[in-house]
Image (spheres, helix red, strand yellow):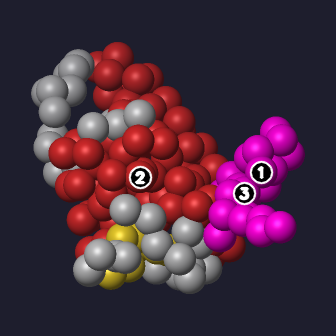
Amino acid sequence: MLIRRERAMNAVAIMLDVAFHAGRTNTVSTAEVAERTGLARRGIEPLLQALGRAGLLESTRGPRGGYRLGKPRGRLTLAEIVDAVASDDPGEEPARGPLQDVVVGPFWNELNELVRERLVATTLADLLRRAEESGMAKPQDEPLTFSI
């Protein structure tokens, strides 16, 4: 499972952006997410679709449409996010031989299990707490306006 790093990290970044800026009640557009994450809009659309199919995001159409979390951030684990965008592409053919079978393969399986345990134990709420602890302030729902 040692995940395709970019795809998984981008999916987590997208979900964190949606959680931070929209949560379960407001929405954010694809363009807003792309701008804040520094990712190409065309590149994140397949990830948004995969996350939506998995029920992790909900989408709303129309001029005020966009994406919001599909369930509470405390119940959204990183493992769910990674699983939703995991590629079926087998990639390169793995090495074969006695050392691979006896040493490298089992060691890789141990690493995968450790990574998986951490992903299952970590929620979007945990990452949002990290953002707040680092001094990031959640954006206001409505811009403040003053009249005198």
- Is residue 92 among what the camera can see? yes
Nearer to us in this view, 41 or 78: 41
Query: Whole-Å distance between the Cαs marked 3 and 1?
Result: 4 Å
Residue located at (61% from left, 79% from top) = 72
| In this picture, residue 120 sits left or right of residue 44 | right
Q: For mark 1, what is the residue?
A: 137
Q: Amino acid at mark 3?
A: Lys
Q: Main secondary structure of the magenta part?
A: loop
Which quadrant of the view contains residue 136? top right
Q: What residue does disc 3 label?
A: 138
Q: Which element carries disc 2, helix, strand or loop?
A: helix
Residue 41, position as x, y percentages in the image? 26, 45
Query: Residue at 22% across / 49% down in the picture?
Result: 87
Query: What's the magenta region?
Result: 122-148
Secondary structure of the residue carrying numbered label 3: loop
Q: Please, what is the three-letter code of the amino acid marked with disc 1?
A: Ala
Relative to 96, residue 121 above or below: below
Is residue 109 depicted above or below 19 in this figure?
above
Among the two numbered marks 2 and 1 on one chain, the one whose residue lies closer to the N terminus: 2
Q: Which residue is mark 2?
A: 32
Q: Is residue 104 left or right of residue 76?
A: left
Q: Residue at x 43, y 23 (%)?
A: 103
